[in-house]
Image (cartoon, rainbow, N blue to C red):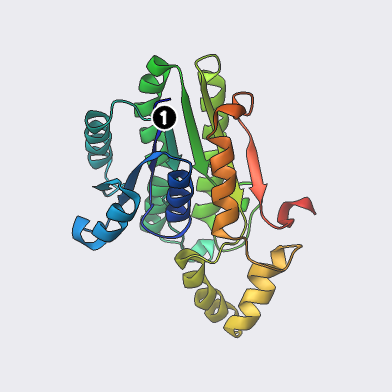
């Protein structure tokens, strides 16, 4: 059997790196993406025997170049995971339009452009898995996260449309909706919430992060990566258009 190739955006750390490592164990060829210079991630590229693509996903021309480079470097790209994202916390009345546009671009528009480009290739090869890392915030809202919640809701909508348009071509599209995972993104939010609420960081964790989880623990990177590995497999042709919560019971209430 030909080894499958997986491309993961935002895969030099956090959830994206966990996914890359999990798929490598499943014998995938890995394509890494990040904003760091190649020399900064050379050891990681070597560890995963992966091609690395340094690209600013806030620039649409750079995304187009990225996709052209990847399709030139690989005979086939079988799995695409749109994982890259950023967050910003602010009341709506103070939320800058610059931050709004940046978050929508990186968390939603980049996934659209990447999917738009890869779908014709996947149709030609009659196989593809597009997996969008959304969030529990794609299913429910929280205060102070207007752009992030809007983008993740939009990403789930995009997932459903792609699933319907690609049905019958051997392509599935699904969203994973993690709760709070203790990544750099979440670690950055903890002091921000503590400052906004004038509470300690420990109180912020227990009240505003784990407080949303019925199971009072952070979701692990490995849990998210395991779900991606399953959905990327050949055995999931009938699983498409779903939004899979991995959020410790957050959205069950």
Q: Where, quadrant-wise, is the C terminus in this rendering?
A: bottom right
Front residue of 192 and 232: 232
Front residue of 223 and 135: 223
Residue at 53% x, 30% y: name it. Answer: 173
Q: Which residue is mark 1?
A: 78
Residue at 36% x, 30% y: name it. Answer: 77
Q: Is residue 174 left or right of residue 104?
A: right
Residue at 31% x, 57% y: name it. Answer: 44
Which quadrant of the view contains residue 31? top left
- Residue 249 lies, with reference to residue 7, above or below; the image says below
Which quadrant of the view contains residue 175? top right
Asked which secondary structure carries label 1, the reply is loop
Classify mark 1: residues with Cα within 10 Å, few (<14), some (14-19) or many (20+): many
Q: Is residue 126 left or right of residue 202?
A: left
Residue at 54% x, 14% y: name it. Answer: 168
- Residue 151 lies, with reference to residue 165, above or below; the image says below
Image position, residue 206 (x, y; %): 68, 75
């Amino acid at each position: 059997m030909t080894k499958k190739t997986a491309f993961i955006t935002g895969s030099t750390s956090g959830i994206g790196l966990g996914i890359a490592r999990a798929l490598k164990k499943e014998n995938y060829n890995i394509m890494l993406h990040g904003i760091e210079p190649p020399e900064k991630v050379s050891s990681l590229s070597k560890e995963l025997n992966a091609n690395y693509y340094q690209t600013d996903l806030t620039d649409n021309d750079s995304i187009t170049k990225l996709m052209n480079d990847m399709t030139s470097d690989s005979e086939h790209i079988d799995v695409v995971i749109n994982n890259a994202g950023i967050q910003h916390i602010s009341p709506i009345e103070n939320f800058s339009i610059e931050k709004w546009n940046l978050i929508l671009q990186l968390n939603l528009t980049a996934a659209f452009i990447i999917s738009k480009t890869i779908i014709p290739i996947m149709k030609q090869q009659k196989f593809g898995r597009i997996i969008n890392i959304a969030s529990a915030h794609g299913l429910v809202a929280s205060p102070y996260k207007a752009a992030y919640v809007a983008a993740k809701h939009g990403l789930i909508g995009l997932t459903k449309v792609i699933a319907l348009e690609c049905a019958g071509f051997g392509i599935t599209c699904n969203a994973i909706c993690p709760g709070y995972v203790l990544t750099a993104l979440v670690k950055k939010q903890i002091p921000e919430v503590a400052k906004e609420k004038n509470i300690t960081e420990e109180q912020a964790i227990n009240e505003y992060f784990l407080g949303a989880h019925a199971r009072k623990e952070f979701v692990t990177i490995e849990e998210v990566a395991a779900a991606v590995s399953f959905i990327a497999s050949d055995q999931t042709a009938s699983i498409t258009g779903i939004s899979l919560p991995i959020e410790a019971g957050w959205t069950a209430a």
